[in-house]
Image (tube, grey):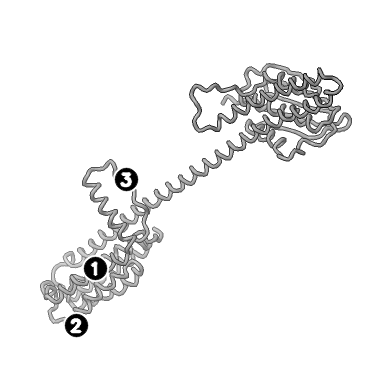
Amino acid sequence: MTPAPNTSDQGAPDHDWSAGAQPLTRYVEGGVQWVRSFDRRRPLVWDLLLTGFFVVAAFIDVAGDGWRNITENENVPLWLVYAMAAVFSVPLLWRRRHPLAVYGVMAATTLVNAWSGASLQASLTLLIVVFNIAMRLPARTLAWTYCLTVVPSVVGHIRYPQGSWDQQVVPMMMSFAIVALMGIAFRTRQEYMASLVQRAKQLEVERDQQARLATNAERTRIAREMHDIIGHNLSVITTLADGGSYAAAKSPERAAQALTAIGTTSRQALTELRRLLDVLREEAPETAALAPQPALTDLDQLIDGVRSAGLPVRSTVRGRPDSLPAGRQLTVYRVVQEALTNTLKHGGPEATAYVDVAYGDDGVRATVTDTGVGGPPTADSSGRGITGMRERTALYDGTLEAGPRRKPPGGWLVELHIPKESTQ
């Protein structure tokens, strides 16, 4: 047993643990909780009440000559009897703050009580101190206090050998053992309750942390989606607008085509943004239609949109994506989309791109290369381009390589591999 904190002064919060218990149990527990609550709030008041009760009882026993009914020696000086009564009761005020000091003073007085033959009943208050020792101090301390408590009984039996050994010594030993066990039981229960409260608080903290982590993860996911949707579509719209403005004076037909493509791309962007923002609503109508997430079957439409923006793109698809889960398809789609968007923004007017997607037994591979001469994709101010692609890929234990290609031919390379979903 290790030293315990002062659980009487600072206990765990009250809990309605007895909701399903019998009425008598609830009443008893309610009374105990009230006493403990009062003790925590007003410990000095409780100590004064307890000490005052035993001081009055001890002095009434002496003043009324009640002690003479069980004394072994009626000739004990009265001043000594009063002094012992005071020592057996007054130090109880400090029993919780200084249990060993109080025990030492009272144990010495108990020895004087046994040697003189006064046999004051007030000496039983020593058991209250023993209870506090069992509640607060190590078992080693409790063991040697047991030995010291038995000594006065042995001395009294030797000096006044009236009655048998078991009548004078054994009752004190049994009383000490019972009180010590009660103290240990109370201490164990308080420590157990304190551990339950601490665990409940820890679980609340962990729950809050999990909620914060989930919130941050959702914010990151939404930020990636917003970056991919707005970044790609605005890049396409900007490129089309620039091309349309340039062609307006020389080829009105090309300018009209650019405006049509801008309208189509804008509507697609709005559709995806509405779908994403609907997720953020606290309550969505049950009848609301949810647009599907982009899949690899939409790659052709994505590439056509990039082509219409003025970037020549060739593509090759090997295998079928039918068995690929929707989450993995969305990741491949977004990576290809981000790579092509970066080429649009940074590749320069003469850039071309090539997209190769292959489905195999080991998963899916996607490679996007370009011949651009502009800056790297990480040049955008948000910094979410390459980072977002890596985060998406990591969700499915995939790998992503992105960097400049050697010259010739130069340009940029983005290579993605997502392994096949495990069946285990």
Q: How many marks?
A: 3
Mark before the other along the chain sequence, 3 or 1:
3
Q: Quadrant of residue 39?
A: bottom left
For residue 12, side relative to residue 399 (left or right): left
The tag earlier along the polypeptide, 3 or 2, is 3
Q: Residue 125 got which mark?
A: 1
Q: Are marks 1 and 2 in contact (CB under 8 Å)?
A: no
Task: Tell me how far mark 3 sits from mark 2, CA to CA.
Answer: 52 Å
Identify the mark nearer the N-term, 1 or 2.
Answer: 2
Residue type, numbered disc 3: Trp
Residue in front for this viewpoint, 149 or 372: 372
Q: Residue 403, percent across and down?
A: 79, 35
- Residue in view at x 81 percent, y 34 percent: 404
Is label 3 or label 2 in front? 3
**What mark, if any, has residue 78 been given in the picture?**
none
Find the distance from the CA under tag 1 to the CA under tag 2. Answer: 20 Å
| Quadrant for the N terminus in the image | bottom left
Above or below: residue 251 compared with residue 38:
above
Crowding near pointer 1: few (<14 within 10 Å), some, many (20+)? some
Quick check: 50 left or right of 300? left
Q: What residue appears at the point 35 percent right and 54 percent down from the top-left corner?
A: 190
Do the numbered discs 3 and 2 sit on residues whose CB atoms are within 8 Å? no
Q: Which residue is mark 3?
A: 17
Residue 160, image x, y percentages: 16, 75
The amino acid type, in three-letter code, at marker 2 is Trp
Point 39% across, 52% down: residue:
194
Residue identified by numbered label 2: 79
